[in-house]
Image (cartoon, rainbow, N blue to C red):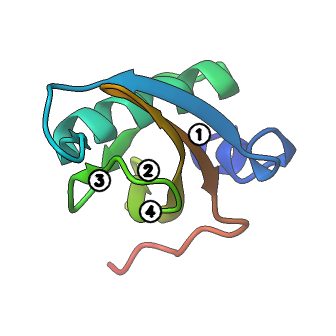
Amino acid sequence: MSILALAAGSTLLLGCSASVEVKKSTPPKLSAGKLSTTLSEKLAAATGQPRPHVSCPEDLVGKVGTTSRCTLTADDGSTLGVTVKVTSVRGDRINYDFKADDKASSSQH
């Protein structure tokens, strides 16, 4: 079973949470690269599969309610959207929930 199938399965439909400490800034920001890496690690841990390729187009601003969209890409080129939402900020630590979309987009070959 692929990471996409598992990510879209019941495990991630409920959503998952993560917490990341970031460099000091006002408001704190989590770089797009670090967000991509963290989501990849969390998705792999939640599904028991190897780390998938996750791409986030922008930094995540540490402000409660801020959302961002990232993309998980499978080996076959199909993609799955992942929504990230900031739930709380404590000092330089950004806490956020993330949820994979219910359905993958097929590859465009």
Q: Earlier in the sequence, mark 2 or mark 1?
A: 1
- Please indicate whether residue 4 sits to the left or right of residue 64 in the image: right
Residue 108: quarter of image:
bottom left
- Residues at marks 2 and 4, CA–CA distance in whole angstroms: 26 Å
Q: Give 34 or 63, whichever is nearer the viewer.
A: 63
Q: Dot 3, how many residues are within 10 Å of its Cα: few (below 14), some (14-19), or many (20+)? A: many
Q: Which residue is mark 4?
A: 66
Q: Dot 4, how many residues are within 10 Å of its Cα: few (below 14), some (14-19), or many (20+)? A: some
Residue under the point 44% across and 62% down: 66
**Please, what secondary structure does the residue beneath circle 3 have?**
strand
- Residues at marks 3 and 1, CA–CA distance in whole angstroms: 27 Å
- Residues at marks 4 and 1, CA–CA distance in whole angstroms: 26 Å
- Residue 13 rendering spot, x and y as whole percentages: 79, 52
Q: Which residue is mark 1?
A: 3
Tell me the kind of residue under disc 4. Thr
- Residues at marks 4 and 3, CA–CA distance in whole angstroms: 7 Å
- Looking at the picture, does residue 56 appear above or below residue 46? below
Q: Are marks 4 and 3 in contact (CB under 8 Å)?
A: yes
**Please, what secondary structure does the residue beneath circle 4 have?**
loop
Q: Which residue is mark 3?
A: 61
Disc nearest the viewer among 2 and 4: 4
Q: Earlier in the sequence, mark 3 or mark 1?
A: 1
Q: Give 81 or 28, whichever is nearer the viewer.
A: 28
Q: Which residue is mark 2?
A: 74
- Looking at the picture, does residue 19 appear above or below residue 69? above
Residue under the point 39% across and 24% down: 20
Tell me the kind of residue under disc 3. Val
